[in-house]
Image (cartoon, rainbow, N blue to C red):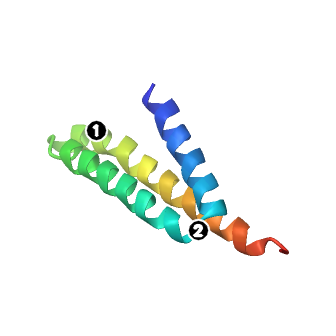
Amino acid sequence: MIIVGIVAVCVVLAVLAFFVPKLSRHPERGTQRTLGLGSRAGSKAPGALGRAFSKPFRSSSKAVGRSGSAGRRARWRMPF
């Protein structure tokens, strides 16, 4: 269920970044900030368990950043 949510957020951010690139920065940063909180909370667990708990949040944050930048990059490559 969480995976579907992250995929949906990435798709929405990519579309938002394509149509309104400047307005897409705020939702992208807010999503990354929220995922960063989860990553920091998960890393409080000791040892390998902490790395395992924080990894999904880190990879989701990277995916959100990549989808937003891909939408903006595609927008600027359009011929019109």
Side of 5 relative to 54 (left or right):
right
Q: CA distance from mark 2 to mark 1?
A: 32 Å
Front in this rendered view, residue 5 or 60:
5
Picture quarter with the N terminus: top left
Residue 50 relative to residue 63: left or right: left
Residue 20, image x and y in percent?
Answer: 60, 65
Label 2 vs label 1, nearer the camera: 2
| Residue 69 percent across, percent down from the top left | 58, 65
- In front of the other: 33 or 22: 22
State the SS at label 1: helix
Q: Which residue is mark 1?
A: 53
* Quadrant in the rendering for residue 50: top left
Question: Label 1 sits on what residue type?
Answer: Phe
Note whether 70 is above or below 55 in the view shown.
below
Residue in the foreground of this view, choosing between 23 and 63: 23
Asked whether, in this view, residue 31 is left or right of residue 37, the answer is: right
Residue in the image at 55% along x and 53% along y: 13
Counting from the top left corner in percent of width and height, residue 51 is at 28, 45
Q: Name the residue carrying label 2.
A: 21
Label 2 crowd (10 A; few <14 / some 14-19 / many >=20): some
Figure quadrant of the C terminus: bottom right
- At mark 2, the secondary structure is loop
Q: Mark 2: which amino acid?
A: Pro
